[in-house]
Image: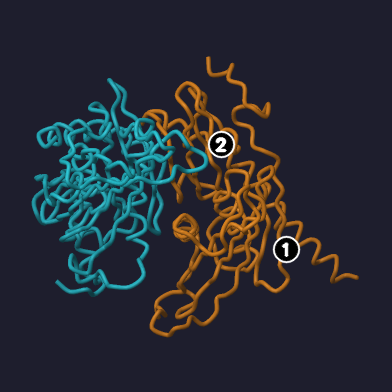
Chain colours: A cyan, B orange
Amino acid sequence: MSSMDITNLTKETFARLFAAGKRFDGRGLNDIRDFEITTGVSDKAEGSARIKLGKTEVIVGVKLAPGEPYPDSRDKGNLTVSGDLLPLASPRFEPGPPEFGAIELPRLVDRAIRESKMIDLGKLTMTNGKVWTVFVDIYPLNDDGNLIDAASLGAIVALSEAKVPELNELGNVDHDVKPKKKLPISDEIAPISFSFFKLGDSIVMDPTREEEEACDARVTFGLSKKGKQYLINSCQKAGKEIFTQEEIDKIMDILPKKFDEVNEKLKKFL
Amino acid sequence: MTKEFKRPDGRKLSELRPIVAKAGVVPNADGSAMFAFGKTIAIAAVYGPRLLHPQHMQDPSTAILRCNYDLLSFSVSDRKKPGPNRRAQEISKVTEWALLPVLDLKEFPNTVIDVQIYIIQADAGTRTAGINAASMALAHAGIPMRDLVCSVAVGKLDKALVADLSKEEEDFEEGEGATDFAVAKVANSDEFTLLQLDGKIEPETVKEVTRLATDVCKEIYEAQKKALKDLVDNEREEKKK
């Protein structure tokens, strides 16, 4: 693997393959790779998960700490999602100030979780006017494409594992007491991220790194389900190409099916 | 049912706030424009194509588009610390992606086109106003474009589909709450260049609301076109004198 930009030749090959509905690994254009999630990556974290989506691997850890509420939401805990594209995970990631990808990834995971109201932040207040800040930290270990969707699955599992720590008399976290109380999380709502990548007129899901690099645009949706209702909680388009109304309509038709498919697999790990 | 929904400022569901558009507002720039949705005011200036430094960033096959969006410190209720935060960096990037599809940059190898967008007064819809201003500024600068880009926030308040949400509407919490969907599209085709959403909305409703965006963008396009045309007319008048 090199960190060179994708060649025109490779790009043309992918364009031709996608147009014929084919992929190198034999998947169909909308097929999502199998994933495995393990928990308890770090026992110092309040909750953690490691997801393998094909060869893409991401670890997500949740930490809780007492903090000040935001002035406009004094009666709610805080959610902070951050992440770093570690140079460990890819020859393309470099040390130094964050590139845009490192800014966008946690922001998209944040918006899907926040807008879906998966975490009941109203229950994360303390008696002394402070609130809990929930830190969700995302670290890719191996980037083989579709990091955002992988990170979102990891974040859901890490959050559902997370426990609220006990406080000592000074109001600090007591690390000697094993926490038992679960984070106030909805059992019903899991906001799953689905990214659609575009090359020429073809749209593919869950690309490998090479496929992803060949694509010219991406649109990512955070989707949750409440009862029988599918709800889009977040969306962001990226890249230099356009999406037509027809393409948007098609994606809207695919989303509920894909949600059920991934959610079914995800349940095994919750 | 949805017809009964009353917007806080009395607007009809698909009614935009008053638009003000003006081209040629920064004399030093190669192109510039101002665009306002009600109280939200954005100005944009274009510099370039000009030689890109450092040299290793140059692309011999094309010019590079570089957008910078930010709020002026006093444009919001609580003073914003000057300098770009992560929100501004993200908006700068999606603005770039919103504008790139209409530009033909192949004619200007090794150069950069800088688009500077600043919000003077913020009252929701700053990124969309910024994109509208930037699109006009690029046209004013004479950058080859296949069309203008028009941008607007559409969304859902409880069950009603609305256009151009105000600040008050973004914070709406009754019923199904507020969904804010910033959209940009190529003016004369159904090609979307910006899609950015927060809230909760069903996939079927997304189909409807993107069509609403297409409808209201026509009004934005006319305002942009008129402003650019007025500028040309005025310059012609000046020359005659």
**Frontmost residue, A138 versus A238:** A138
Residue that mark 2 sits on: B215
Q: Is residue A242 left or right of residue A253?
A: right
Q: Please name the amino acid that badge 1 sits on.
A: Val
Q: Report whether residue B47 is seen.
A: yes
Residue that mark 1 sits on: B25
Query: Is residue A191 positioned above or below A229 on the image?
Result: below
Judge the density around disc 2: few (<14), some (14-19), many (≥20) Cα neighbours within 10 Å. Answer: few
Direction front: furthest residue: A169
**Frontmost residue, A170 versus B75:** A170
First in residue order: circle 1 vs circle 2? 1
SS at mark 2 in the image: helix
> Residue at the spot x=26%, y=39% of the render?
A192
> Residue at the spot x=31%, y=23% of the render?
A229
**Frontmost residue, B235 versus A99:** A99
Q: Nearer the viewer, mark 1 or mark 2?
A: 1
Residue A149 x, y percent position in the rendering:
24, 47
Give the chain letter at badge 2.
Answer: B
Direction bottom: furthest residue: B55
Q: Is residue A193 left or right of residue A44?
A: right
Residue B228 x, y percent position in the rendering:
70, 58
Q: Please name the amino acid that badge 2 sits on.
A: Asp
Which corner quadrant holds the C terminus of chain B? bottom right
Disc 1 from disc 2: Cα separation: 28 Å
Residue B134 x, y percent position in the rendering:
59, 59
Res B54 quadrant in image: bottom left
Query: Is residue A144 positioned above or below B216 on the image?
Result: below
